[in-house]
Image: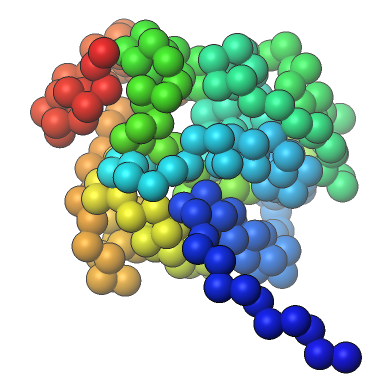
Amino acid sequence: FEPLPTPQVQQTAASRFLQVELELNAHLRRLAFSQPVRHVYNPLEYAWEPHRCYVEKFCRAGQSVLFLGMNPGPFGMAQTGVPFGEVRSVVDWLKITGEVGHPHDEHPKRRITGLACTQKEVSGSRFWGFFRKLCGEPDHFFKHCFVHNLCPLIFISASGKNLTPPELPADEREALLALCDIALCQAVEALGVTMVIGVGRVAEQRARRALSAAGVKVQVEGIMHPSPRNPLANKGWEEVAKAKLSELGVLSLLSN
């Protein structure tokens, strides 16, 4: 038996991007994490359906800007498979659909209820709410921009606390982020974007280092993270983000 030769079909930006993510998933499965990590969720596995819906719907040729978050929030992408994926924004504005399953080892305080999740993720609500206000329709935003997370995994302690990658043991964090760095470089090349905007300093610094080390010619910038844990973001994240995007020349692409 010989497998049929693969036809040379022209791949779309979305199919190339999904391929990068599937390869990253395969590498991430081999990693092990120790204390304080007790549970590891990968929404690119159990929430693959809505994630694929998001990518196939909105990842397209000609986008020049990639907004890059760090990793999923427990009530955002962990539930919906969409970066900054606060449920109402994902369902009502982005019109994403799909079945969401369960991680194989769920923490009782961190249940996955998918698109039925009623808990609000403030970061995601601020992020997508801002672009909804600015662009009106998702198509206006996605004509020029796409949104992605550097790392697809969410880490939970024994008590149910959400742990960010900087809180992991150093060697485990580096093994994880080295794989995510490679995937980021592949994703940037698959998309053909010319600017990566890190949402929050950690994502910005990691992207700058990874892309520069790999010789990927792309401009790396950053905007403030909309997290409610950031006092400056609570004072008026939209104004800060708007000023920065205006300075970068991105605002003029997005304004109606």
Residue at x 68% of width, y 82% of height = 5
Based on the displayed image, in which of its 4 quarters is residue 189 positioned? bottom left
Between residue 29 and residue 82, name the one nearer to us.
82
Between residue 191 and residue 82, name the one nearer to us.
191
Residue at x 55% of width, y 35% of height = 57
Residue 97 place in picture, x, y as percent: 71, 26
Is 90 positioned to the left or the right of 61 in the image? right
Q: Identify the colour scheme used.
A: rainbow
Is 232 positioned to the left or the right of 226 in the image? left
Residue at x 52% of width, y 29% of height = 84
Residue 99 place in picture, x, y as percent: 81, 32
In the depicted structure, whether residue 86 falls above or below residue 239: below
Q: Residue furthest bottom?
A: 1
Q: How many marks?
A: 0
Residue 222 place in picture, x, y as percent: 26, 38
Residue at x 20% of width, y 51% of height = 219
Between residue 26 and residue 178, name the one nearer to us.
26
Quadrant of the rendering where the N terminus is positioned: bottom right
Residue 190 place in picture, x, y as percent: 42, 59
Q: Residue furthest left?
A: 247
Quadrant of the rendering where the C terminus is positioned: top left
Evaluate whether residue 171 shows in this view.
no
Evaluate whether residue 54 shows in this view.
yes
Based on the displayed image, in which of its 4 quarters is residue 201 positioned? top left
